[in-house]
Image (spheres, rainbow, N blue to C red):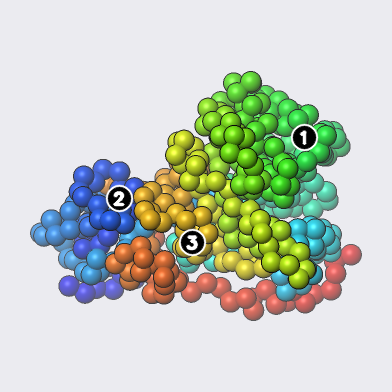
Amino acid sequence: MTFDLKAPPAAYILGPVRAPACLVPSFAGTADAEGLVALDIAVEGARLARLAPAGALVEAGPRLGLSGGLVLPGLVDIHTHLDKGFIWKRAPNPDGSFDGAVNAVNADRAAHWTEEDISRRFDFGLRCAYAHGTVAIRTHLDSEGPRAAGAWRVFARMREAWRGRIDLQAVGLIAIDRVLDDSAFTPFLDLVRTHGGRLGAYTYLTPNLEAGLARLFDAAERFGLGLDLHVDERDREGRGLDLLARMTLERRFEGPILAGHCCALAVKGEDEIDRTLDLVAQAGIAVVSLPMCNLYLQDRQSGRTPRWRGVTLLQEMRARGIPVMVASDNTRDPFYAYGDLDLAEVYREAARIAHLDHPHGDGPALISRAPAAHMGVEAGTLAEGSPADLSLFPARSLNEWLARPLAGRTVLRAGRAIDTMPPDYAELDDLMERPRDL
């Protein structure tokens, strides 16, 4: 039977379809060599009513045959920077370096980041993510200086405006050295607490690293806040992850901790890697890798091919039971010139960069089940009673999907197909061409 998913019947069957077994926790069928299981999925209203082996739901309602195409649940992007997004046209990175990114963003923030500017770019990013099948996002917000309060007010408005479409969480972001300065840390902490956010910081090689982390832990313990940190992103010698794990264990801290990037680990000796990862596993720290942004920035030197690619040790972490995930990070800003908040693209690149295939195993969980569990949102798995928020791809295998992930996608929200055309970049042209806000 054929019907229009934009106006479907109240109850219908999708099938036969294929889905990663790691995202179908209750299914007992046999997975194929790529870890996919063949299913029928019954949709009733806005929820998944039943999952069964392919062909089993014969009399359950009108059926839309998908020729065994791939189905994924609502996707979860746990590390983004929506306040920075889509400024590339007016603030390009002059040389693609980390320092070039920092300088370009600082200048653009001072010149342009009014609440209107942040709000329009923030909403633009959310519409991109929504069109690509994302149902939950955590964003870091630069949280020092005169623009910080405005960014958090924009976040609060967007969280409410997008409720029911994208669940939004935020992390306050500040340099670890500034944590020790009351004039910076006190208003930072107030913003995070007022808006129900999480504590974050850029950690890097500095004599103040241990003291700064200790102060973050103190605040997290006092006010019951989670931690979400940028760790060892640009310093090959960085040992922030090891220190973070040791402090977590010493303090017996039980709040959630997410460590982002962790790039330096890839260039450590095997003994140090083993010691650090054992501590991370004991401490219960989760890790998110940002493979596209790290490849763009790491080891960039003019006229020289990069050697250090900056991707952390996801496979070794998974082997120890450390929760791992991948995410978009920056999009069309000086820290990453490309990207569109499309987690299908993120996973495609992560699988290639970090060799998350042969076998794929639970690889698709890195953009779905794992970040959803860490964020505490209802998403990321296919189960009876789950929201009928699905992405349907005309691919019968993960190989076909990764070879052509952007073609022919259908996104269902509450069981109905939505428009998958992302917003036009031209919408932001007036922001990109306006005079400096002095």
* Residue pictured at 85% horizontal, 69% vertical: 436
The image quadrant where one finds the C terminus is bottom right
The amino acid type of the residue labelled 1 equals Leu
Q: Earlier in the sequence, mark 1 or mark 2?
A: 2
The amino acid type of the residue labelled 2 equals Ala
* Residue 4, placed above or below residue 209: below
Element class at badge 2:
helix
At which x and y percent is residue 421? 48, 74
The image quadrant where one finds the N terminus is bottom left
Q: Is residue 61 left or right of residue 24?
A: left
Q: Which residue is mark 1?
A: 209
* Residue pictured at 77% horizontal, 68% vertical: 302
* Residue 435, placed above or below residue 199: below
Task: Find the distance from the CA under tag 2 to the CA under tag 3.
Answer: 21 Å
Q: Is residue 419 left or right of residue 248?
A: left
Discs 1, 2 touching: Cβ within 8 Å: no
Q: Which mark is residue 352?
A: 3
Task: Find the distance from the CA under tag 1 to the CA under tag 2.
Answer: 41 Å
Element class at badge 3:
helix
Q: Which residue is mark 2?
A: 21
